């Protein structure tokens, strides 16, 4: 089955700086890579996702890059703000007609210092 | 997101008891999922269901059971066979089909504590 590794486990940045979180996956058949943000005690919420036919996707201050050959993908947050402080999870899956079974990385706790 | 309702929010279980966590969705999603999250950890898949009256084991199904009698409902029972059930349980749902949006949406979660 799929295995997803995520690094670093914690990340502390100064407000306004950039944050980068990296994930690797093991199953070359995976074709869908979402990123979720989870605040303490809350549900994970999708912030951005990318499919394997695209190398990069941006949404305002957030971008995700995908390297299918190396089987890794990264989340980039620019101009970080205190409200970006949360735990971020990457995930991978092979989308099938029957559904979307995500395998998650272990999470990165991001702290943005004012 | 608001279309997935989990209850109860907090639940305490005594040793040897079975407890059932409710999950209802009004998003007309075919697929539903149960994930477990331990403090400071990622999410692990317990069970998932792609269609009514059918479900499959995930990575950590031992000690859990589910049913899918209605499209909207996917309850999870934590049995006494689950030796370490204290965790945050998240129900989720999505559409199926390769060409449809496959975003997985989560409910607000249920905290289960063994006392």
Image (cartoon, coloured by chain):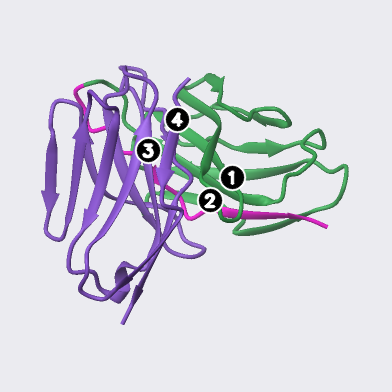
Chain colours: A purple, B green
Q: Which residues are magenta?
A: B99-115
Query: Which label belongs to residue B71?
Result: 4
C-alpha span from label 3 to label 4: 25 Å
Rendered residue at 53%/50% (across/down): B6
- Name which of mark 2 and mark 4 comes first in the sequence: 2
C-alpha span from label 2 to label 4: 15 Å
Where A111 falls versus A70 (above or below)? below
* Labels 1, 3: front one: 3
Q: Residues within 10 Å of mark 1 (few under 14, many from 20)?
A: some
Give the residue pinned by disc 1.
B22
Rendered residue at 59%/37% (across/down): B75
* Figure disc tally: 4
* Labels 2, 4: front one: 2
C-alpha span from label 3 to label 2: 23 Å
Q: Quadrant of the C terminus of chain B?
A: bottom right
Percent position of residue A69, x then y: 23, 23
Discs 4 and 1 lie in a common subunit: yes
* Labels 3, 2: front one: 3
Between residues A44 and A33, which one lies in front from this camera angle?
A33
What chain is tagged by disc 3? A
Discs 3 and 4 lie in a common subunit: no
Residue A32 as seen in the image, left or right of residue A39 = left
Query: Which label belongs to residue A102?
Result: none
Give the residue pinned by disc 3.
A91
């Amino acid at each position: 089955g799929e295995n997803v590794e995520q690094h670093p486990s914690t990340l502390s940045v100064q407000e306004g700086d950039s944050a980068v979180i990296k994930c690797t996956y093991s199953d070359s058949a995976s074709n869908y890579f979402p990123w979720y943000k989870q605040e303490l005690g809350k549900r994970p919420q999708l912030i951005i996702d990318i499919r394997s036919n695209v190398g990069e996707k941006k949404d305002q201050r957030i971008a995700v890059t995908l390297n299918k050959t190396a089987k890794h993908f990264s989340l980039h947050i620019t101009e970080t703000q205190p409200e970006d402080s949360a735990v971020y999870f990457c995930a991978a899956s092979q989308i099938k007609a029957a559904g979307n079974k995500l395998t998650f990385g272990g999470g990165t706790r991001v702290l943005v210092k004012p | 997101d608001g279309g997935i309702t989990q209850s109860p929010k907090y639940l305490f279980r005594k040793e040897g008891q079975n407890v059932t966590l409710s999950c209802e969705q009004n998003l007309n999603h075919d697929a539903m999922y149960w994930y477990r999250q331990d403090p400071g950890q990622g999410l692990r898949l317990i069970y998932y269901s792609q269609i009514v009256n059918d479900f499959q084991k995930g990575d950590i199904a031992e000690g859990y059971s589910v049913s899918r009698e209605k499209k909207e409902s996917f309850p999870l029972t934590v049995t006494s066979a689950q030796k370490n059930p204290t965790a945050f349980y998240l129900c989720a749902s999505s559409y199926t089909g390769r060409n449809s949006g496959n975003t997985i949406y989560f409910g607000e979660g249920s905290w289960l504590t063994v006392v």
